[in-house]
Protein backbone atom coordinates (compact mmCIF):
# COMPACT_ATOMS: atom_id res chain seq x y z
CA UNK A 1 0.00 0.00 0.00
CA UNK A 2 2.96 2.34 0.63
CA UNK A 3 3.84 2.65 -3.08
CA UNK A 4 0.25 3.63 -3.96
CA UNK A 5 0.11 6.23 -1.18
CA UNK A 6 3.45 7.64 -2.34
CA UNK A 7 1.98 7.77 -5.88
CA UNK A 8 -1.05 9.71 -4.62
CA UNK A 9 1.15 12.27 -2.88
CA UNK A 10 4.08 12.16 -5.30
CA UNK A 11 4.40 15.94 -5.50
CA UNK A 12 4.87 16.32 -1.73
CA UNK A 13 7.36 14.71 0.62
CA UNK A 14 5.75 12.73 3.45
CA UNK A 15 7.96 11.75 6.37
CA UNK A 16 7.49 8.32 8.03
CA UNK A 17 5.10 9.63 10.68
CA UNK A 18 2.92 11.40 8.07
CA UNK A 19 2.98 8.35 5.82
CA UNK A 20 1.84 6.17 8.74
CA UNK A 21 -1.05 8.56 9.49
CA UNK A 22 -2.20 8.28 5.89
CA UNK A 23 -1.79 4.49 5.72
CA UNK A 24 -3.97 3.82 8.76
CA UNK A 25 -6.79 5.87 7.25
CA UNK A 26 -6.98 4.49 3.72
CA UNK A 27 -8.33 1.28 2.28
CA UNK A 28 -7.39 -0.39 -0.99
CA UNK A 29 -10.38 -1.79 -2.90
CA UNK A 30 -10.79 -3.65 -6.16
CA UNK A 31 -13.76 -2.90 -8.41
CA UNK A 32 -14.72 -5.10 -11.35
CA UNK A 33 -15.88 -3.93 -14.76
CA UNK A 34 -19.62 -3.06 -14.79
CA UNK A 35 -19.72 -2.98 -10.97
CA UNK A 36 -21.39 0.04 -9.40
CA UNK A 37 -19.24 1.69 -6.76
CA UNK A 38 -22.12 3.97 -5.85
CA UNK A 39 -25.86 4.15 -6.58
CA UNK A 40 -28.25 7.06 -6.41
CA UNK A 41 -29.71 7.39 -2.92
CA UNK A 42 -26.80 5.69 -1.10
CA UNK A 43 -25.05 7.47 1.73
CA UNK A 44 -21.76 8.91 0.57
CA UNK A 45 -18.92 9.74 2.91
CA UNK A 46 -15.78 8.84 0.98
CA UNK A 47 -13.53 9.91 -1.86
CA UNK A 48 -11.68 7.49 -4.11
CA UNK A 49 -8.29 7.75 -5.79
CA UNK A 50 -7.91 5.73 -9.01
CA UNK A 51 -4.66 3.75 -8.96
CA UNK A 52 -5.63 2.01 -12.20
CA UNK A 53 -8.75 1.35 -14.28
CA UNK A 54 -11.49 3.67 -15.49
CA UNK A 55 -14.75 4.80 -13.88
CA UNK A 56 -17.53 7.20 -14.74
CA UNK A 57 -20.01 9.26 -12.76
CA UNK A 58 -23.46 9.58 -14.28
CA UNK A 59 -26.94 10.83 -13.50
CA UNK A 60 -30.26 9.39 -14.71
CA UNK A 61 -32.92 12.00 -15.42
CA UNK A 62 -36.67 11.59 -14.91
CA UNK A 63 -37.10 10.19 -18.43
CA UNK A 64 -34.46 7.50 -17.83
CA UNK A 65 -31.71 9.14 -19.92
CA UNK A 66 -28.12 8.85 -18.68
CA UNK A 67 -25.90 11.94 -18.45
CA UNK A 68 -22.19 11.22 -17.94
CA UNK A 69 -20.66 13.87 -15.69
CA UNK A 70 -17.12 12.59 -15.31
CA UNK A 71 -14.68 9.93 -16.41
CA UNK A 72 -11.82 9.08 -14.05
CA UNK A 73 -8.58 7.27 -14.84
CA UNK A 74 -5.26 6.64 -13.09
CA UNK A 75 -4.25 9.56 -10.90
CA UNK A 76 -7.75 11.07 -10.66
CA UNK A 77 -10.18 11.30 -7.75
CA UNK A 78 -13.87 10.41 -7.93
CA UNK A 79 -16.93 10.70 -5.70
CA UNK A 80 -20.42 12.18 -5.72
CA UNK A 81 -19.24 15.73 -5.04
CA UNK A 82 -22.76 17.18 -5.04
CA UNK A 83 -23.64 15.08 -2.02
CA UNK A 84 -20.22 15.02 -0.39
CA UNK A 85 -19.66 18.78 -0.41
CA UNK A 86 -23.21 20.08 -0.82
CA UNK A 87 -25.27 21.39 2.06
CA UNK A 88 -28.54 19.61 1.29
CA UNK A 89 -27.93 15.88 1.60
CA UNK A 90 -25.36 13.19 2.23
CA UNK A 91 -27.15 10.79 -0.11
CA UNK A 92 -25.80 10.26 -3.59
CA UNK A 93 -27.57 11.85 -6.54
CA UNK A 94 -25.35 10.03 -9.06
CA UNK A 95 -24.03 6.59 -9.92
CA UNK A 96 -20.37 5.63 -10.19
CA UNK A 97 -19.76 2.73 -12.56
CA UNK A 98 -16.51 0.88 -13.17
CA UNK A 99 -15.98 0.67 -16.93
CA UNK A 100 -12.51 -0.92 -16.75
CA UNK A 101 -11.56 -3.03 -13.71
CA UNK A 102 -9.93 -0.76 -11.16
CA UNK A 103 -7.84 -0.58 -8.03
CA UNK A 104 -8.92 2.33 -5.83
CA UNK A 105 -7.83 3.90 -2.59
CA UNK A 106 -10.79 4.85 -0.42
CA UNK A 107 -10.73 7.40 2.39
CA UNK A 108 -13.62 8.85 4.33
CA UNK A 109 -14.13 12.59 4.02
CA UNK A 110 -13.98 12.89 7.82
CA UNK A 111 -10.60 11.14 8.01
CA UNK A 112 -9.32 13.08 5.02
CA UNK A 113 -10.35 16.38 6.64
CA UNK A 114 -8.44 15.36 9.78
CA UNK A 115 -5.35 14.48 7.69
CA UNK A 116 -5.59 17.87 5.97
CA UNK A 117 -5.57 19.62 9.36
CA UNK A 118 -2.73 17.51 10.74
CA UNK A 119 -0.64 17.57 7.54
CA UNK A 120 -1.23 20.95 5.84
CA UNK A 121 0.77 20.03 2.72
CA UNK A 122 -1.91 17.39 1.96
CA UNK A 123 -4.54 20.10 2.22
CA UNK A 124 -2.61 22.35 -0.18
CA UNK A 125 -2.21 19.50 -2.67
CA UNK A 126 -5.93 18.67 -2.52
CA UNK A 127 -6.91 22.32 -2.92
CA UNK A 128 -4.76 22.46 -6.06
CA UNK A 129 -6.49 19.32 -7.40
CA UNK A 130 -9.94 20.74 -6.61
CA UNK A 131 -9.09 24.06 -8.26
CA UNK A 132 -7.97 22.25 -11.40
CA UNK A 133 -11.10 20.08 -11.41
CA UNK A 134 -13.34 23.11 -10.87
CA UNK A 135 -11.69 24.92 -13.78
CA UNK A 136 -12.16 21.82 -15.98
CA UNK A 137 -15.84 21.57 -15.08
CA UNK A 138 -16.39 25.27 -15.90
CA UNK A 139 -14.50 24.89 -19.18
CA UNK A 140 -16.71 21.92 -20.06
CA UNK A 141 -19.88 23.91 -19.32
CA UNK A 142 -18.68 26.74 -21.55
CA UNK A 143 -17.76 24.32 -24.33
CA UNK A 144 -21.19 22.68 -24.13
CA UNK A 145 -22.81 26.10 -24.48
CA UNK A 146 -20.61 27.54 -27.21
CA UNK A 147 -19.02 24.78 -29.31
CA UNK A 148 -20.52 22.51 -31.92
CA UNK A 149 -20.80 18.78 -31.19
CA UNK A 150 -17.87 18.13 -33.53
CA UNK A 151 -15.69 20.70 -31.76
CA UNK A 152 -16.61 19.21 -28.36
CA UNK A 153 -15.68 15.72 -29.60
CA UNK A 154 -12.33 16.92 -30.99
CA UNK A 155 -11.58 18.63 -27.66
CA UNK A 156 -12.53 15.44 -25.82
CA UNK A 157 -10.18 13.20 -27.80
CA UNK A 158 -7.37 15.77 -27.59
CA UNK A 159 -7.79 16.35 -23.84
CA UNK A 160 -8.48 12.74 -22.83
CA UNK A 161 -6.74 10.42 -25.33
CA UNK A 162 -6.47 7.61 -22.75
CA UNK A 163 -10.17 7.59 -21.95
CA UNK A 164 -11.73 7.06 -25.38
CA UNK A 165 -10.26 3.58 -25.77
CA UNK A 166 -11.76 2.46 -22.44
CA UNK A 167 -15.34 3.65 -22.82
CA UNK A 168 -18.34 2.80 -24.96
CA UNK A 169 -19.70 5.11 -27.64
CA UNK A 170 -22.86 5.86 -25.68
CA UNK A 171 -20.72 6.93 -22.68
CA UNK A 172 -18.85 9.45 -24.84
CA UNK A 173 -22.07 10.63 -26.50
CA UNK A 174 -23.66 11.07 -23.07
CA UNK A 175 -20.63 13.03 -21.84
CA UNK A 176 -20.78 15.30 -24.90
CA UNK A 177 -24.56 15.74 -24.70
CA UNK A 178 -25.24 14.19 -28.12
CA UNK A 179 -26.75 10.98 -29.48
CA UNK A 180 -24.65 7.96 -30.44
CA UNK A 181 -25.82 8.48 -34.04
CA UNK A 182 -24.44 12.03 -34.01
CA UNK A 183 -21.17 10.73 -32.57
CA UNK A 184 -20.92 8.16 -35.39
CA UNK A 185 -21.55 10.88 -38.01
CA UNK A 186 -18.91 13.13 -36.47
CA UNK A 187 -16.34 10.31 -36.39
CA UNK A 188 -17.11 9.40 -40.01
CA UNK A 189 -16.77 13.03 -41.07
CA UNK A 190 -13.40 13.33 -39.34
CA UNK A 191 -12.18 10.05 -40.84
CA UNK A 192 -13.35 11.04 -44.36
CA UNK A 193 -11.39 14.31 -44.18
CA UNK A 194 -8.09 12.53 -43.45
Image: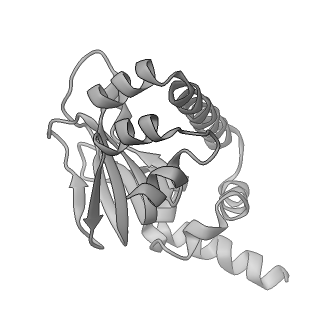
Q: Is residue 57 found left or right of 142 in the rendered image?
A: left
- Residue at point 76%, 75% (across, down): 190
* Viewer-closest of 192 and 58: 58
Q: How many marks?
A: 0
Location of the N terminus by quadrant is: bottom left
User: Which quarter of the figure has residue 158?
Assistant: bottom right
Location of the C terminus by quadrant is: bottom right
Residue 149 at x, y percent in the picture: 65, 56
Name the colour scheme. Answer: one colour
Establish if 83 lies above or below 140: above
Extreme-left residue of the structure: 42
Extreme-front residue of the structure: 16
User: Which quarter of the figure has residue 102?
Assistant: bottom left
Residue 17 visible? The answer is yes
Extreme-top residue of the structure: 87
* Viewer-closest of 34 and 168: 34
- Residue at point 25%, 17% (across, down): 88
- Residue at point 73%, 76% (across, down): 189
Residue 177 visible? The answer is no
Establish if 20 lies above or below 2: above
Residue 86 at x, y percent in the picture: 33, 21
Residue 59 at x, y percent in the picture: 32, 46
Extreme-right residue of the structure: 194
Establish if 180 lies above or below 119: below
Amino acid sequence: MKPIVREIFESIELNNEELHKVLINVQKIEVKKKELLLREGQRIDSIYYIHNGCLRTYFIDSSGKEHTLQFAIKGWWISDYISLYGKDSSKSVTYIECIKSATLVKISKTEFDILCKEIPKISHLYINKLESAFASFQKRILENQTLSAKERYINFINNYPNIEQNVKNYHIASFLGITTESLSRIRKEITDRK
